């Protein structure tokens, strides 16, 4: 009988407010729900590589993609419990904790990602960031996925009226729910990792997502119609819990923040490039019927969604809406 003795170095986690000593390796488990071929998936790997290299292996970021460790709806609690140290959930998913963040879900709130980045850096954006503190969350930055498009298996969507009666998958956000309800569709909150299955079973007719997310999960193979509507932004907050963040030595905090700044710029460009590539591929594949909304149609859609803004203002106040780029003169 051969007995294999495996010695494994235990991951080092801080206890209470004890600072991690410089001799111990710091392991940061970074869990997310999308594929590795998406902007978030690729940026997470790049971030891990750079940190390993720049810390000479002292800080190790272990990336767990595709919800293999924790799924949607689980990763936030796992972060707060300290079972993982970093997540990058879609902002729509943070709205269950801080509903004011759903300003980012408002249809046609932003024309492009630059507008989003400016908004997040503005005073109101920073006051949204501050609201995370009460939930023990520390935000280290914003990554883009891009703008959402609509797909379904029932009919081409050219006007908002075409959405009437469709069962549409959404992320957990009241504003996204309103967005579909007010046009007569039926929003259904479904975890990202089961969207393919639910579409396949016919439990929903369609969904909204960015092209990189749609293609990475092959959702388009189950859908007949795609509308390039660019109606809403999908992006992420890079989150740690405050205790873990505060337990890190200052030089490690600086390394993480500086590296993330660089990776963030890289990720924004990547999201833009990958989205353009995916669109070209979908146009060429002849596998789905694509409808492009014209600028004029987008304006009509934007007015049709006006009640969603009223819903937001009534529930969460006007301040965050007034500061949107389209409301600045
Ligand atoms: C979704 O649930 O559709 C997205 O939040 C997935 C992601 O993380 O991009």
Image: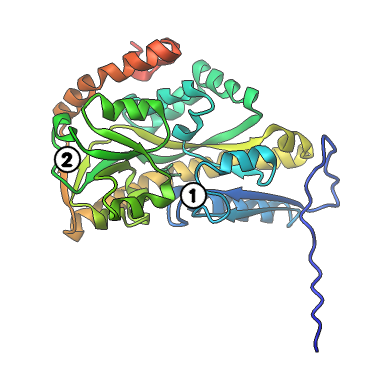
Q: Earlier in the sequence, mark 2 or mark 1?
A: 1
Residues 292 and 317: in front is 317
Q: Which mark is residue 292?
A: 2
| Residue 15 image point, x, y percent | 82, 41
- For the residues labelled 2 and 1, the Cα–Cα distance comes to 28 Å
Whether residue 298 appears in this view of the structure is yes
Q: Which mark is residue 43?
A: none
| Quarter residue 156 falls in | top left
As drawn, 37 above or below 207: below
| Quarter residue 119 falls in | top left
- Quarter placement of the N terminus: bottom right
| SS for dot 1 | loop
Residues 243 and 256: in front is 243
Q: Is ligand 1 less than 8 Å from the beta carbon at label 1?
A: yes
Residue at numbered disc 1: 33
Which of pointers 2 and 1 indicates the residue nearer the eye? Answer: 1
- Quarter placement of the C terminus: top left
| Residue 239 image point, x, y percent | 60, 37
| Residue 237 image point, x, y percent | 53, 35
| Residue 326 image point, x, y percent | 32, 18
Q: Quadrant of ligand 1?
A: top left
- Count residues near mark 1 (Cα–Cα under 10 Å), then give few for <14, some for 14-19, many for 20+: many
| Quarter residue 295 falls in | top left
Left or right of 242 on screen, residue 329: left
- Count residues near mark 2 (Cα–Cα under 10 Å), then give few for <14, some for 14-19, many for 20+: some
């Amino acid at each position: 009988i051969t007995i294999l003795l495996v010695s494994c170095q235990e991951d080092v986690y801080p206890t209470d407010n004890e600072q991690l000593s410089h001799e111990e390796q710091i392991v940061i488990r970074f869990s997310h729900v999308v594929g590795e071929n998406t902007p978030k998936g690729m940026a997470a790997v790049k971030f891990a590589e750079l940190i390993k290299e720049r810390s000479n292996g002292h800080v190790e970021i272990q990336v767990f993609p595709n919800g293999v460790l924790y799924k949607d709806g689980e990763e936030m609690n796992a972060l707060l419990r300290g079972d993982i140290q970093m997540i990058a959930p879609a902002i729509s998913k943070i709205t269950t904790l801080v509903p004011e963040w759903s300003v980012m879900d408002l249809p046609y709130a932003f024309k492009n990602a630059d507008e989003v980045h400016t908004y997040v850096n503005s005073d109101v954006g920073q006051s949204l960031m501050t609201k995370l503190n009460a939930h023990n969350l520390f935000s280290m930055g914003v990554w883009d996925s891009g703008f959402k498009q609509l797909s379904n298996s029932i009919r081409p969507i050219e006007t908002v009226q075409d959405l009437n009666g469709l069962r549409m998958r959404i992320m957990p956000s009241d504003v996204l729910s309103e967005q579909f309800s007010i046009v007569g569709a039926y929003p259904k909150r479904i975890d990202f990792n089961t969207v393919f299955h639910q579409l396949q079973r016919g439990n929903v007719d369609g969904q909204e997502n960015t092209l990189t997310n749609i293609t990475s999960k092959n959702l388009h193979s189950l859908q007949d119609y795609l509308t390039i509507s660019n109606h809403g932004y999908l992006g992420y907050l890079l989150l740690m819990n405050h205790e873990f963040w505060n337990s890190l030595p200052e030089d490690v905090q600086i390394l993480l923040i500086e590296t993330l700044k660089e990776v963030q710029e890289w990720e924004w460009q990547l999201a833009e490039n990958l989205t353009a590539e995916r669109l070209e591929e979908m146009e060429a594949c002849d596998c789905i019927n694509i409808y492009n909304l014209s600028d004029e149609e987008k304006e009509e859609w934007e007015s049709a969604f006006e009640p969603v803004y009223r819903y937001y203002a009534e529930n969460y106040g006007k301040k965050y809406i007034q500061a949107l780029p389209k409301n600045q003169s």
